[in-house]
Image: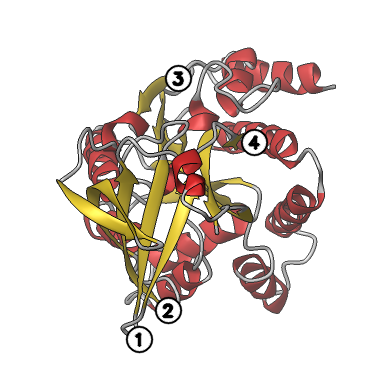
Amino acid sequence: MKKVFYALIFLLCISAGAFPEITLVGETHGIENIYNEELKLYRDFYKNGGRHYFFEIGYNTAQLLNFWMNREGNELLDVIHGNWSGTLSGGEFTYNFLLAIKKEFPETVFHGIDVEHQFKTNGMIYLDYLERNGLQGSKRYDRAMESIKQGKNFYSKKNGDRYREKCLTENFLREYESVKGEDVFGVFGSVHTAKSVTGRGSFATMGMNLLKAGLDYNEFNLSDMIWKKSPDHIINLRINGISYRAGYYGTQSLRGMKEFDSRDFYVLLNSSITELNSHGRKFKKTGNYLPQGNFPMKLEEGKVYVLDYFYTDGTMESEIHICDGKRKDGQLVTYQVR
C-alpha cells in the first residue's frame, strides 16, 4: 500500500511538468548559531522566489503561525511559543528566529509536517477556530483532526519513532503535492533529513522515504557546526567534597522556559563515573536524560558532565550526568545520576 502511495505522488509530480527544487536543512533544535545559518540559507531561497517553509511542527500549529504572519503584533506567537515551553523549541532563540522570519520574509507560508505534538493546546486552538467558523467536514478540518490523531498515536505507541517517521513522510508528500510545482525549503532535526540510517534503528528516515518516492533534495546538515572543540577555561570543580579538574563550556540562556534562567556546562577531565564511585558514594541513574542537542560540546561515551541550573528566583541546582553510549531518537544521551 505504501509503495502505491509513493508511486502516486511520483506520477502527480510528473504530470505537473517538473519537480520543484527541494532544500532540506538538518538541524539540532534551539541553537542560536544554527538559526543564524538557517536564516542565511532561507534568505537565498526567498530571494529566488521561494515561499513554502516545511517545518517540523504539526499541521495545526503551522496554520496558527500563518495566522500570526498575517496579523499585527505577536500575541498569537506568544501563545504558540508558550505551548512549546519545556521543549527544545521553547527558548528565546526559536522565538527570535520566528520574529526574523516575519520581519524579513513576510510572504512565507508555513507547512506543518510533523505529528501534532501540542495536540492538547495549539492543536485544539486551531480546531476550535475551524468549528467556530462552521468548517467541520472541510479538508482543513479533516487534516487538523488527522494531525491531532497522529500526535496522540505517537505518544501512545511503543514503536512511536517508527510511526512518526512514517507520518513525517506522508505529511511531507501531501504538502509537497499541494504546492503544485513550487520550490520547497524545509527544516527538520538532522536525523529526519538523513539519506541513510543514523542510529535510529532499522527503520528508514523521512529522507530515505522521500528518495524512495522519487524526490531527491539538497541537504544541508548544520548539526555538526555547533560543537565547541575545547573548553573556555579549566577549573577545579568540587563534587561531594572531592576536587576534580573540569572544562567549562559556557552558559546557555533558558529564558522563556518556566522558572529557568540559564545553565552552565562542565565536563570532568580524566575522571569517570567509576572514579566518582570509588570515593565512597555509589551514583545511580535517576531516569532523567538529556539528548546531545542540549549540549554545546560533542558528547563522548564514558565522560561525566555537570550542569549548573540557575533559576529566576536566584537559586541554583547542580546535576551530574554520565554518557554510557546509549541513544534516543538517533542522538547520544546523558543520564542524570545521584
Look at label 3 and name its amino acid: Tyr
Q: Quadrant of residue 3?
A: top right
Sooner in the amino-acid sequence: mark 3 or mark 2: 3
**Marks 3/2: CA distance?**
41 Å
What's the distance in space between the residues labelled 4 and 2, CA to CA? 39 Å
Q: Which amino acid does label 4 sit on?
A: Arg
Say which element carries label 4: helix
Instruction: State which mark lies toward you, 4 or 1.
Output: 1
Of labels 1 and 3, the one closer to you: 1
Identify the residue under disc 1: 313
Residue 217 numbered tag: 3
Mark 2 belongs to which amino acid? Answer: Glu
Name the residue beneath numbered marker 2. Answer: 259
**Relative image position of residue 314 (x, y in whole percent):** 31, 83
Instruction: Name the quadrant of the N terminus.
Output: top right
Q: Which badge, 4 or 3, is on the more N-terminal residue?
A: 4
Q: Image point 59% across, 21% down: which residue?
A: 210
